[in-house]
Image (cartoon, rainbow, N blue to C red):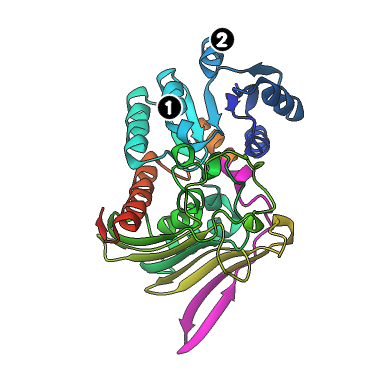
Amino acid sequence: MSIKIAIIGAGGMAGYHATGFRQAGAEIVALADVNQAAAEKAAAQHGITRVFSDVADMLRTLPELDAVSIIVPNKFHAPLAIAALKAGKHVFCEKPPALTAREATVMKQTADKAKRTLMFNFNNRARPESYAMMEYITDGAVGKVNSCQAKWIRRTGIPGFGGWFTNKSLSGGGPMIDLLHMIDLGLYFMGYPEPAHILARTFSDLITDKTFKGPWGIPDVAKGVTDVEAAAHGFVTFKTGQSMAFQVSWAEMNKREEVSVTFQGSKAGGLVQRLFGLDGIDATAIDTCELYTHERGRPVNRSITVPPDAPMGRVRSAMNFIRTLEGSEKPLNTPDQAVSLMKIIDGAYKSAATGRPVAL
């Protein structure tokens, strides 16, 4: 029998989740959103017959549900995931895992107690480039990944002013927590080592300048709150001796939007990169996947060719969740990794606030 899943949240990511779940053979039986009209519109768009405006009501009404996916503002990730896990459902949650490492830890503990799968949509792990690069890493061609540089930088990419993205109480922060994908991918390539220390700085010079709004996101809220950073830079050390430098921004004086991880291994280095077009839209992006080696005393750069994937792994990541539940694939991420990632996010904000390095 196919996995029965419900989607919580009527936002734009619902389409990727729905496509991935169906391609993996799951049945989407319901969609829930506190905004009834938005729920009905999204359900009709994605061919979902049951609509709910209350998640608790949905969980009571549909005991046959095997799993839920969560696509809501960050503040509600932990409480909704915990409620679903306690109801005996597997959970696929959008990033970030939670607002804090403490919340992520409670989510993990709840999943362990319920003996249910908890996964997160770290979709960049599911890109063809990442799958290919991990083959080289796991085969030993790269050796130990000693260091990496993680970037998701934008020039004009603030996702709306006054909405939940820019309200720290709802989002947990700005690009540091929103664009954590490349930090996660770098950690993934390095084997998710245990972090030791972090030094970070945040910058808010452009966060209220509406000429830096991105081409996507949510509508502005005239009397809403904008109290998050526009950019964050930092450096993380790990107990294994590895290190990571990161740069994330919604608005910063860069040439163009770049999404990338560069790493240096003991045998080879590598790059996974997407350079967006000047309009900031996926369809005009340029993808690069390269491996840097040294052979016969000479530098050798290998270009790795993979199929194009405009959704950047969003569909494939949802497929992996269903296949994990069925036992045909291993999970692309774990709750332990989510907790470790959130410790780095927490530490970055603490370091930026105090101006001092933070032990993790």
Measuring from the top left, give residue 59's x and y in whole percent.
52, 15
Compared to 302, does 101 lie above or below? above
Q: Does residue 327 appear in this view?
A: no
Residue type highlighted by circle 1: Pro
Residue type highlighted by circle 2: Thr
Residue beneath label 2, please? 61
Measuring from the top left, give residue 271's x and y in whole percent.
53, 69
Front: mark 1 or 2: 1
Residue stretch in magenta: 290-317
Q: Residue at x 64, y 45 (%)?
A: 217
Residue lying at the far top in this picture: please name it: 61
Q: Secondary structure at mark 2?
A: helix
Residue 38, by quadrant, is top right
Give the side of residue 66 with respect to residue 116, left or right: right
Q: Residue at x 46, y 73 (%)?
A: 269
Residue beneath label 1, please? 79
Measuring from the top left, give residue 304's x and y in whole percent.
60, 68
